[in-house]
Image (tube, rainbow, N blue to C red):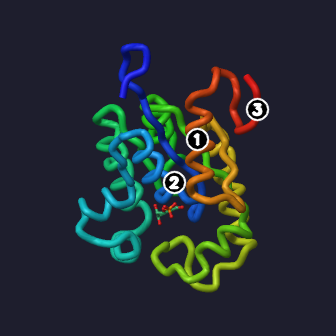
Amino acid sequence: MRRGGERRRQAVLVGFMGAGKSSVGKVLAQRLGAEFVDVDERIESAAGRRIGEIFASCGEEAFREMEKEAIRDAVSAPGRVVAAGGGAFVDEANRRALKAYAPVFFLEVSVESVMERLSGDRSRPLFPAGREAGKLRELMERRSPSYREADFTVPTDNRSIQEIADGILALMARKPGARREGERA
Ligand code: S3P
């Protein structure tokens, strides 16, 4: 897709587990006519294993190395919509690579919504069965300064995937300066 004769940079989605990065990313890519890259899926297909198995057999540190590699790969071709896993943006090199690639959208979600959205989910090693809200809040707060380095913040609580994608598209078309939906430049 072209704007002013230049190739569009498209978008990067970051944020906590359960924020809706993959679902929103798919819709957004479709609306933009762009390729969608889900970093977690890339890791799984490169390793031939699910993320839970990678954490269980190799540990989180090895997973983070695979994640770095998958991000390098995700940003190797222009014009994509990239959804990164919840911990990816905490790493400085990942942050730098993603921010240099395209505008970064932080999908903001409350602990309450995460608990609700992921209640039956067993695929996330950092969200084990019986995870208490307090532990989740602690992890979210620890990551919050990194998420705040995104170019834009997009609220997701009580909003549909379509509404969130619309919000991102509106921000992509905005005048420079606004950092949050509804904000004027
Ligand atoms: C993680 C989030 C997961 C996945 C892995 C670690 C995290 O991705 O990358 O389980 O550290 O928050 P989602 O954010 O897509 O759940």
- For mark 3, what is the residue? 183
Question: Eyeballing the image, is 102 above or below 25?
Answer: above
Residue type at mark 3? Answer: Glu
Which quarter of the picture shows residue 176?
top right
Residue in the picture at 29% in, 36% down: 76
Counting other residues with Cα less than 10 Å from the Cα at mark 1, is it few (<14), some (14-19), or many (20 or more)? Answer: many
Residue in the picture at 35% in, 76% down: 53
Counting other residues with Cα less than 10 Å from the Cα at mark 2, is it few (<14), some (14-19), or many (20 or more)? Answer: many
Residue type at mark 1? Answer: Ile
Please tell me whether mark 1 sits on a helix, a strand or a loop: helix
Asked if the residue at tag 2 contacts the one at tag 1, i.e. Cβ–Cβ closer than 8 Å, the answer is yes
In the image, which disc is placed on residue 139?
Answer: none
Residue in the picture at 68% in, 44% down: 145
- For mark 1, what is the residue? 168
Question: Eyeballing the image, is 115 above or below 172?
Answer: below
Report if the beta carbon of the residue with label 2 is closer than 8 angstroms to ligand 1. no
Please tell me whether mark 2 sits on a helix, a strand or a loop: helix
In the image, which disc is placed on residue 24?
Answer: 2
Asked if the residue at tag 3 contacts the one at tag 1, i.e. Cβ–Cβ closer than 8 Å, the answer is no
Which quarter of the picture shows residue 134?
bottom right
Counting other residues with Cα less than 10 Å from the Cα at mark 3, is it few (<14), some (14-19), or many (20 or more)? Answer: few
Please tell me whether mark 3 sits on a helix, a strand or a loop: loop
| Mark 2 or mark 3, earlier in chain | 2
Residue 65 as seen in the image, left or right of residue 168: left
Please state, as top left, top right, bottom left or bottom right, where the C terminus lies in the image: top right
